[in-house]
Image (spheres, rainbow, N blue to C red):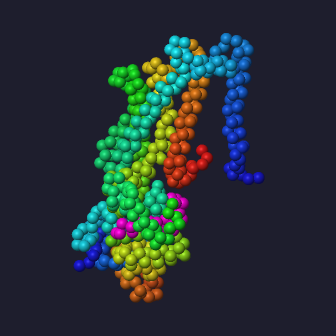
Amino acid sequence: MKKIINLQPHNGTRWLLALLPFLLLLLLYVAASNARLADNPGDKLLPAMGSFADAIQRMAFEPDKRSGDYLLWVDTGSSLIRLGLGVGISALAGLAFGILNGAIPFARAPLSPLVTFLSLIPPMAILPILFIIFGMDELAKVMLIIIGITPALIRDMQQRVLEIPAEQLIKAQTLGASSWQIILRVVLPQILPRLLASVRLALGSAWLFLIAAEAIASTDGLGYRIFLVRRYLAMDVILPYVIWITLLAFFIDYGLKKISQWSFPWFHSQTGDGGKS
Amino acid sequence: MSYIQIRNLWKEYADQVVLERINARVNKGDFITIVGASGCGKTTFLKMLLGTESPSRGAILLEDAPIPDEPSQQRGIVFQRYSVFPHLTVLKNVMLARELEHSPLLGKLFGSARRTAKQEALAMLEKVGLTAAIKKYPHELSGGMQQRLAIAQSLIRKPAILLLDEPFGALDPGIRADMHKLVLELWKQHQLTIFMITHDLKEGFLLGTRLWVFDKPRHDPQAPGAFGARITYDIPVGQSDRSLYQKIDQQLQVTQELTMEGNAA
Ligand SMILES: Nc1ncnc2c1ncn2[C@@H]1O[C@H](COP(=O)(O)OP(=O)(O)OP(=O)(O)O)[C@@H](O)[C@H]1O
Ligand SMILES: [Mg+2]
């Protein structure tokens, strides 16, 4: 018998083991839901599977009675645009300022302490200020995401740039590279896969800020909907929305990982996360 | 007039004297191997030639002017590791120098300029025996192949001076012999002036035109940092004999032990 740290599940077994906890959770839910509904058929806390199907049918495949929109898709579109704008702008800012701070000591000296300071401000605390400055429309919500994740991204990118071995920067100079060329040919390409990795981690916070902003001031969006129907204790809508958000988050993360593996094979075989996740 | 003059060079870190009173003259085309106990300041000396460390006192003159105090294409370097770019294939690692030279804005070449650079890089890679590996990334190469790549990459910009810091330290003896042949060939072909650090005294007796031994002539057991290393031997290679080899070997070992004791105390 091998030691347990050396025992590896085979492909089929691995899939089965991965599905098992989900199946157990589902079973547990169905059992609990059945028990509650048997007590009180009007219970709203743990709706039956059928109620979910009805809610999904109503939200995703039938036009809303008042607006005529297919609400789930409208909400999804609005939220994804906000998320994409917020995360995209943050990533660009993180890349630009991270490289600037990491590569140029005279930029780092004034900017690095400032970024550290900004990163410590709790973004939710300044949400009212954002609403006052940017109004209640799209800009404020996108700004919350940007303010929430950019400082950390800048700090992370700066750190990654500083981790590039000094030997490489010296080497490039002995090949005649200017500061600009070093940034373009040595620093930037090595930092891009690290940016993708940081963005993947930052997405969790980005979703948090998005849903918070939508809950407080919005007329559509996934977060808005959840907080709206909470008033009617509509668990049959809330739970599918939560699972849908989770799925979206999962596929965005997976997509970014695949893009990274495909674009930067040298990075992933170096860090050894080429294949399995 | 000598090509490089080293005048009363000192290097100190805080209260530790690393190098003291180094004086030497180097002619164009000299191939100098440097040996010395671990921690005696060989890399520090090379960094001053490279321009990434500055002398505490004294000066290094290159063609009678102070040597530039930042790295330049005049002085190529091969470090013990981290010398090649992990995000570029073998071919692109070597082409990079040409791209930097001819494309100041983008650092990238296109069309016929790119083809010319590629041909040149391929010729250089053939000399170091990496033709079969041009599409590989550095992490897919063995240690010896990476060092050969680093040498090819340094030489394509045609530096006047080549600095090698234990470039073959991690390689096994068979490959090392091949690498020696390669370096000697390239040295003659490109009329380089080479400084090569090695921790293998035999290598120093074998390669190049001059052997420098860095050693501390004085020790103070109470204050191990009080005295620095100097060039204790400057021997033309090929004119030395077995007994000299043994003598230097012995002295370096004594220094090494004294340094270890100093550090332990
Ligand atoms: N940046 C630094 N700050 C303080 N001390 C340093 C610094 N760089 C080197 N030293 C000290 O200078 C001495 C010489 O270091 P150096 O790297 O030149 O040794 P070396 O001869 O190359 O040794 P090795 O053969 O082990 O590579 C060492 O004692 C080291 O601790
Ligand atoms: Mg050294």
Q: Residue B9: image x %, image y %?
A: 28, 70
Horizontal side of B152 relative to A70 (left or right) equals left
| Residue B205 visible in the shown view | yes
Magenta span of residues: B136-159
Q: Is residue B211 above or below residue A106?
A: below
- The quadrant the C terminus of chain B occupies is bottom left
- Is B139 included in the stretch rendered in magenta? yes
- Residue B187 figure quarter: bottom left
Dominant secondary-structure state across the stretch colored magenta: helix
Which residue is painted at 53% across and 20% down in the image?
A71
Q: Residue furthest front?
A: B112
Asked whether, in this view, residue A274 is left or right of residue B80, the answer is right
Quarter of the image with the N terminus of chain B is bottom left
x 52%, y 15%: residue: A68
Identify which residue is drawn at 69% across, 36% down: A19
Q: Position of residue B82 (x, y in %)?
A: 45, 60
Say which of A274 and B198 sits in front.
A274
Determine if the magenta segment contains residue A116.
Answer: no
* The one of A67 and B44 positioned closer to us in this rendering: A67
